[in-house]
């Protein structure tokens, strides 16, 4: 198979390929190179490389690289909650190193990202020690879980924020499923702690929208959020409509349970998060190609 010109063909080195993607964007890669990468993706036995090449070949401004992100999370033994913090910390590092653009906007994003990290790590804003992805075989691949589609707009901050949001939705779904089991097993105190944690997690998801306004367009809807919603069931005034295999249904079966007000607080946090998204979309329907 013919190769692209040397200056646009990184050979078989993932680091050189990622550097090329950074300069040209996935949408600017030559057709010959893309064809070769497709063959390499199908032939490789390296699951990290296969996931990375899937992202490069997708050439989509809404591709979040979640398969590779989950693979590096597993390899580094990180919780979804911890990875969300590292992703937002990476926004700070990226923005501090960036040149050009609007300095005021860059400072605002750094400030809000630092606040997220401070809350997540339980430290004062002034004392935040920016965490980094742990050293190890997965570390180089973490850096490759975001790449620009075009050379002019990399959308780095928005992609990282959307990835962090997906991690938080993973936490929400896990909390709700565990709480449902706890209710069924007669462990209401444990269930209450899990619901409280889910409520806090929604608050952190709302904080993400202050770093970068998250669009409401259908192309960034989250299957992970849908898994949370399905496991939780309807809240608020629709609590009694819930299926018995959901958290809402399990709690509704005991109307005097202390978990009823806990679910009300969870619903209030969810509504604040949804309201923030709607307000951002109405004010500025952000697109990924304007989010660098």
Image (cartoon, helix red, strand yellow):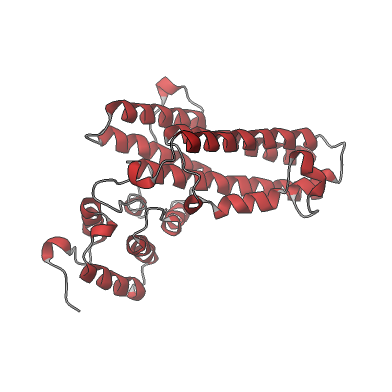
Give the position of the N terminus as an image quadrant: bottom left
Q: Residue furthest front?
A: 282
Q: Quadrant of residue 274?
A: top right
**Is 26 above or below relative to 187?**
below
When the figure is inspected, residue 6 is found, relative to residue 180, above or below; the finding is below
Q: Where residue 82 sits: x, y (%)? A: 49, 42
Lateral position of residue 174 relative to residue 161, left or right: right
- Residue positioned 69% across, 52% down in the render: 231
Residue 182 image offset from top left, x and y in percent: 76, 47
Residue 218 is left or right of residue 141, and the answer is: right
Q: Is residue 282 above or below residue 39?
A: above
Quarter containing the C terminus: top left
Note whether residue 26 is visible: yes
Is the residue 288 above or below the residue 207 in the image? below
Identify the residue at horizontal 42%, vertical 36% (top origin).
Answer: 212
State the residue at coordinates (40%, 46%): 159
């Amino acid at each position: 198979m013919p190769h692209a010109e040397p200056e646009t063909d990184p050979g078989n080195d993932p680091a050189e390929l990622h550097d090329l993607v950074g300069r040209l964007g996935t949408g600017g890669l030559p057709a010959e190179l893309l064809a070769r990468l497709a063959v390499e993706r199908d032939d490789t036995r390296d699951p990290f490389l296969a996931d990375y090449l899937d992202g490069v070949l997708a050439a989509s401004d809404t591709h979040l690289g979640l398969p590779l992100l989950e693979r590096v999370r597993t390899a580094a033994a990180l919780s979804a909650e911890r990875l969300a913090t590292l992703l937002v910390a990476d926004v700070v590092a990226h923005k501090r190193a960036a040149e050009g653009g609007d300095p005021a906007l860059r400072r605002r994003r750094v400030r809000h990202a630092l606040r997220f990290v401070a809350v997540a790590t339980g430290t004062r804003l002034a004392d935040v020690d920016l965490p980094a992805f742990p050293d190890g075989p997965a570390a180089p691949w973490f850096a490759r879980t975001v790449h620009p589609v075009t050379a002019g707009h990399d959308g780095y901050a928005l992609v990282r924020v959307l990835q962090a949001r997906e991690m938080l939705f993973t936490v929400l779904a896990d909390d709700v499923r565990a709480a449902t089991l706890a209710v069924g097993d007669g462990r209401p105190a444990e269930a209450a702690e899990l619901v409280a944690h889910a409520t806090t997690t929604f608050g952190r998801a709302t904080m993400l929208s202050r770093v970068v306004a998250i669009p409401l367009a259908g192309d960034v809807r989250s299957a992970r959020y849908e898994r949370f919603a399905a496991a939780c069931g309807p809240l608020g005034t629709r609590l009694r409509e819930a299926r018995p295999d959901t958290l809402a249904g399990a709690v509704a079966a005991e109307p005097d349970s202390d978990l009823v007000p806990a679910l009300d607080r969870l619903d209030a946090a969810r509504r604040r998060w949804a309201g923030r998204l709607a307000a951002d979309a109405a004010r500025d329907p952000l697109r990924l190609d304007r989010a660098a």
